[in-house]
Image (cartoon, helix red, strand yellow):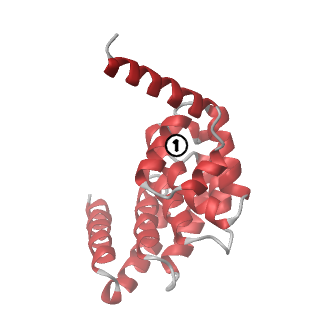
């Protein structure tokens, strides 16, 4: 075995030992970066027990841990949507808290945008997304993701379309460029579906 191979083997063993003994909360607090988030997503992988640990931190810890867990949660949900299914009602219910950081709302609503929302969560998801969309204080990304969630839900529940159209149209004149772009696309799609 060459020196390089010995080094790589030793490094791999150290990384495996680290991953086996990792404290998720400590790692969330250690560093807030894409690299750290990617490493934690890989550590969780398809492991339901590890994902449940992440969910516990996301739902019940102090704000900095919750904020950082939200990023990991969002990436985990995009890579392994089946991990979220047993936790989705808790994730949606969490959005109704008044003390949430914008990063938590943004990452959570993005999850709702990216996954199939089960029937039993659709009503609450629509309610909170309408609330975010109607709020003048809400962050642009949260509003944009909310419009996408609502548009997706309106395909199954056409009665949502008039309120969605009205809220988007009301905000377009004074909205940011990002929201106007998203809103225009959704209005165009809503109008196509009306004409079809």
Residue annotated with mark 1: 40
- Can residue 143 be spotted in the picture? yes
Q: Quadrant of residue 170?
A: bottom left
Residue 135 sits above or below residue 36 on the image? below
Q: Position of residue 85 (x, y in %)?
A: 60, 40
Looking at the image, which residue sits at the far top? 1
Horizontal side, residue 23 vs residue 6: left or right:
right
Which residue is drawn at the image coordinates 39% and 74% (left, top)? 165
195 versus 28 height, above or below? below
Q: Quadrant of the C terminus?
A: bottom left
Nearer-the-camera pick, 71 or 149: 71
Which residue shows up at 41% across the image and 75% down it? 140
Residue 125 position (above or below residue 41): below
Q: Residue furthest front?
A: 3
Left or right: 103 in relation to 63: left
Q: Crowding at label 1, few (<14), some or many (≥20) Cα neighbours within 10 Å?
A: many
Please indicate, yes or no, whether residue 69 appears anywhere in the rendered image: no
Looking at the rendered structure, the secondary structure element under dot 1 is helix
Q: Position of residue 59 (x, y in %)?
A: 69, 56
- Closer to the camera, 88 or 16? 16
Question: x, y percentage for residue 101?
Answer: 58, 71
Give above or below for 74 relative to 47. below
Residue positioned 32% across, 65% down in the render? 190
Residue 151 drawn at (x, y percent): 41, 61
**Residue at position x 26%, y 67% from top?**
188
Q: How many marks?
A: 1
């Amino acid at each position: 075995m060459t020196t390089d191979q010995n080094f790589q083997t030793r490094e791999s063993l150290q990384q495996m030992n680290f991953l086996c003994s990792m404290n998720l909360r400590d790692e969330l607090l250690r560093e807030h970066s894409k690299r750290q988030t990617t490493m934690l997503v890989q550590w969780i992988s398809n492991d339901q027990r590890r994902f449940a640990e992440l969910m516990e931190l996301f739902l019940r810890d102090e704000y900095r841990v919750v904020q950082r867990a939200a990023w990991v949660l969002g990436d985990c949900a995009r890579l392994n949507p089946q991990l979220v299914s047993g936790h989705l009602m808790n994730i949606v219910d969490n959005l109704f808290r008044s003390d949430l950081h914008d990063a938590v709302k943004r990452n959570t609503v993005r999850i709702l945008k990216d996954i199939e929302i089960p029937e039993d969560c659709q009503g609450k998801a629509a309610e909170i997304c309408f609330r975010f969309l109607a709020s003048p204080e809400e962050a642009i990304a949260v509003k944009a993701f909310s419009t996408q969630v609502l548009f997706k839900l309106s395909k199954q529940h056409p009665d949502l379309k008039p309120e969605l159209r009205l809220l988007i149209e009301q905000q377009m004149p004074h909205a940011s460029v990002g929201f106007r772009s998203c809103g225009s696309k959704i209005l165009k799609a809503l109008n196509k579906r009306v004409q079809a």
